[in-house]
């Protein structure tokens, strides 16, 4: 019971082409379905045969179409039979387009039959939108299957054609890319790639898909490295950054006495930071007293102590005062060390001063 509940919460990933997107379907009616098996499903273009590549948890807020049935041996034989007729159908389409005229700028790339021949799709590419009513009417008269004409982009054309890329390997789009990511010229600039069209353009005439592979790594690495023409301090002296190597976490610096030298990020100091450190080193110490200070030097060797010593040396010398004379203490008549201080004379009254101390009767 628990196993069936878990299977009902899973959906099957089905792919219809060799290198294509995954579409998810409900397989609860076929719990014994295994990865690698072929199934028949209903799509917007009718019934299609696809291959189950795996299973994934279902999204609760999404409705999934159910798998109609597993493909039988007859279905697989029918698919191979109709697939063998695709090349002939493409030749007929190209010939009729040339006879009708007006499709010189249209390139018919492929013809694709449904697994049971109930639908025939012609894929073509063009720079602009094309009116396909005339060729569509002619093809309906030549083929018994319903006809569909679908315009695709240059990247899809390269994916169908296959072949080798400029790197010498099979094209990414025809080997493992199931979707095309948006690519801009900014990605090439961030990676330091030459903007020569022959070096950044793929066989499809668009920017190469591989430009997006390492773009995020380059952006993150450049955040911690100095930019070009930036002046930095290195172990060999001041220099100017002439090249940046993001994936190596290093830069190439031009030093007048040494020339080109490559340094790691840890060996570099920006000039503004270096000048700030030099300015702080020349300022007086921020702490006072006999203890250690911010500069780490002993008392007497600090910038503050040196400035105090210099100011004292530059100040004018002051005249020394003579020592105060020593006052000798009088000795007591009895020879004691603490004689009594002399008493002031007694104050006489005015009457006694004027009459000789005699009182008038």
Image (cartoon, rainbow, N blue to C red):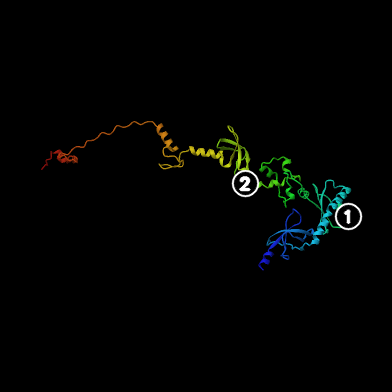
Query: Residue 264, percent across and down?
Result: 58, 41
Query: Residue 71, percent across and down?
Result: 78, 61
**Secondary element at tag 1:** helix
> Viewer-proximal residue, 289 or 256?
256
Quarter of the rendering occupied by the N terminus: bottom right
Number of numbered discs on residues: 2
**Disc 2 target residue:** 220
- Image quadrant in which you'd find residue 63: bottom right
Taking the image as shown, residue 114 lies to the left or right of residue 296, namely right
Query: Residue 112, percent across and down?
Result: 81, 54
Taking the image as shown, residue 148 lies to the left or right of residue 53, namely right
* CA separation in Å, label 1 and label 2: 58 Å
Identity of the residue drawn at 66% across and 46% down: 215
> Viewer-proximal residue, 129 or 88?
88
Rendered position, 351 above or below 29 = above
**Secondary element at tag 2:** helix
> Viewer-proximal residue, 345 or 265?
265
Q: Earlier in the sequence, mark 1 or mark 2?
A: 1
Query: Residue 21, percent across and down?
Result: 73, 55
Q: Which mark is residue 121?
A: none
For this orientation, the residue located farthest to the left is 361
- Image quadrant in which you'd find residue 357: top left
Quarter of the rendering occupied by the C terminus: top left
Q: Which mark is residue 142?
A: 1
How crowded is the residue under tag 1: few (<14 C-alpha within 10 Å), some, or many (20+)? Answer: few
For this orientation, the residue located farthest to the bottom is 1
How crowded is the residue under tag 2: few (<14 C-alpha within 10 Å), some, or many (20+)? Answer: few
């Amino acid at each position: 019971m628990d196993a069936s509940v878990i299977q009902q919460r899973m959906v099957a990933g089905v792919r219809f082409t060799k290198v294509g997107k995954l579409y998810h379907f409900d397989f609860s009616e076929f719990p014994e379905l295994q990865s690698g098996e072929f199934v028949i499903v209903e799509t917007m273009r009718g019934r299609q045969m696809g291959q189950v590549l795996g299973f994934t948890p279902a999204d609760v807020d999404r409705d999934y179409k159910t798998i109609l049935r597993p493909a039988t041996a007859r279905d697989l034989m029918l698919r191979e039979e109709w697939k063998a007729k695709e090349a002939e159908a493409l030749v007929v389409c190209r010939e009729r387009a040339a006879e009708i005229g007006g499709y010189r700028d249209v390139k018919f790339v492929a013809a694709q039959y449904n697994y049971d021949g109930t639908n025939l799709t012609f894929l073509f590419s063009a720079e602009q939108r094309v009116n396909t009513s005339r060729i569509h009417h002619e093809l309906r008269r030549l083929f018994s299957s319903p006809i569909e004409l679908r315009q695709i982009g240059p990247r899809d054309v390269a994916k169908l054609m296959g072949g080798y890329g400029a790197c010498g390997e099979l094209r990414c789009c025809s080997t493992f890319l199931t979707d095309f990511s948006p690519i801009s010229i900014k990605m090439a600039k961030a990676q330091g790639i030459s903007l020569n069209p022959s070096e950044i353009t793929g066989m499809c005439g668009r920017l190469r898909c591989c430009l997006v592979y390492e773009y995020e790594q380059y952006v993150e690495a450049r955040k911690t490295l100095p930019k070009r023409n930036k002046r930095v301090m290195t172990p060999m002296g001041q220099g100017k950054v002439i090249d940046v190597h993001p994936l190596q976490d290093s830069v190439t610096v031009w030093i007048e006495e040494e020339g080109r030298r490559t340094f790691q990020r840890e060996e570099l100091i920006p000039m503004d930071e270096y000048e700030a450190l030099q300015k702080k080193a020349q300022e007086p110490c921020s702490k006072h007293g006999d203890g250690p200070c911010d500069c780490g030097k002993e008392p007497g060797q600090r910038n503050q102590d040196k400035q105090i010593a210099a100011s004292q040396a530059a100040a004018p010398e002051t005249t020394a005062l003579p020592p105060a004379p020593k006052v000798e203490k009088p000795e007591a008549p009895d020879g004691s060390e603490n004689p009594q201080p002399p008493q002031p004379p007694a104050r006489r009254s005015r009457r006694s001063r004027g009459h000789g101390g005699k009182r008038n009767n």
